[in-house]
């Protein structure tokens, strides 16, 4: 397994403030998030882990990898669904509130006009395939944590959503109103000991999603 961060096309008007403050939205939390998760996956499981890479959606090497990662998909512009329909799994992370959801859902409807985004059932094996997870976690971004809350942009309740293929396989793990990337990125920062609870939750949920994608 290899952490594949996707360099995607994005809506420049929606992304202007993000780009001015953080840089391009597809690169947020990197490279620390993928480096930390890769190390943790290698120590927690028997999976052979390779070094993280960045690929564009047009890169043919994308089809060599079963799992790819999109951060800040509230800005995303999608043009193709072939990777997902051929058995790949995409993780979408770190977008919040109704405005970003509406944009993301609109992009999904463009590439999957006949498929719906649905909540992942609490009984789904992704919650127990490696770690037992009783409740889907809301991971606070570091800025939200320092402000004394776990939510941002009006995204008060965290949801794990997906689109199923014809065989019932989840093609997506859509982490909405939660910031797994910050949980991974800041896991080695000793200045924020209270943040470690979010780090633990982020690792567990991310590893479950990866293990499920590799085994189903």
Image: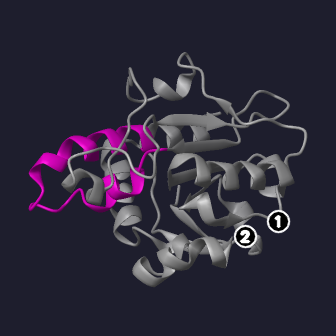
Mark 1 to mark 2 CA distance (whole Å): 9 Å
Residue at the location (46% across, 36% down)? 158
Q: In the drawing, what numbered circle is on residue 57?
A: 2
Q: Is residue 152 above or below residue 161?
A: below
Q: Residues within 10 Å of mark 2 (few under 14, many from 20)?
A: many
Residue 30, x across and y down, in percent:
41, 71
Looking at the image, the residue that sits furthest to the right is: 114
Tell me the quadrant of the picture where the C terminus can be found. top right
- Residue sitting at x 45%, y 34%: 157
Residue at the spot x=62%, y=70% of the render? 14
Q: Position of residue 177 (x, y in %)?
A: 47, 44
Query: Residue 131's spot in the image, x, y percent?
Result: 38, 28
Q: Answer above or below: position of 216 versus 13.
A: above
For the residues bearing labels 1 and 2, Cβ distance under 8 angstroms: yes
Left or right of 160 in this view: 30: left
Q: Secondary structure at mark 1?
A: loop
Task: Based on the picture, tell me whether residue 92 belongs to the magenta stretch.
Answer: no
* Residue linked to disc 1: 79
Disc 1 residue crowd, few under 14, some 14–19, many 20+, Cα 10 Å: some
In the rendered structure, which disc, 1 or 2, sits on the residue that comes first in sequence? 2
């Amino acid at each position: 397994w290899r952490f594949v961060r996707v360099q995607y096309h994005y809506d420049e008007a929606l992304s202007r403030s993000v780009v001015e403050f953080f840089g391009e939205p597809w690169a947020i939390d990197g490279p620390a998030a993928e480096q930390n998760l890769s190390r943790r996956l290698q120590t927690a499981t028997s999976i052979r882990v390779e070094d993280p890479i960045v690929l564009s959606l047009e890169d043919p090497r994308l089809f060599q990898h079963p799992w790819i990662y999109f951060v800040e998909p509230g800005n995303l512009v999608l043009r193709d669904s072939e990777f997902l329909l051929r058995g790949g799994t995409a993780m979408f992370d770190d977008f919040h509130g109704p405005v970003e959801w509406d944009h993301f859902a609109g992009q999904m409807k463009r590439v999957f006009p006949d498929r719906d985004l649905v909540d992942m059932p609490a009984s789904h094996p992704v919650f127990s395939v490696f770690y037992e997870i009783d409740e889907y976690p809301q991971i606070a971004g570091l800025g939200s944590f320092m402000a004394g809350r776990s939510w941002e942009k009006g995204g008060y309740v965290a949801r794990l959503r997906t689109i199923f293929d014809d065989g019932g396989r989840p093609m997506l793990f859509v982490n909405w109103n939660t910031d797994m990337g910050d949980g991974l990125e800041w896991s080695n920062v000793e200045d924020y000991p209270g943040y470690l609870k979010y780090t633990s939750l982020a690792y567990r949920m991310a590893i479950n999603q990866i293990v499920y994608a590799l085994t189903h």
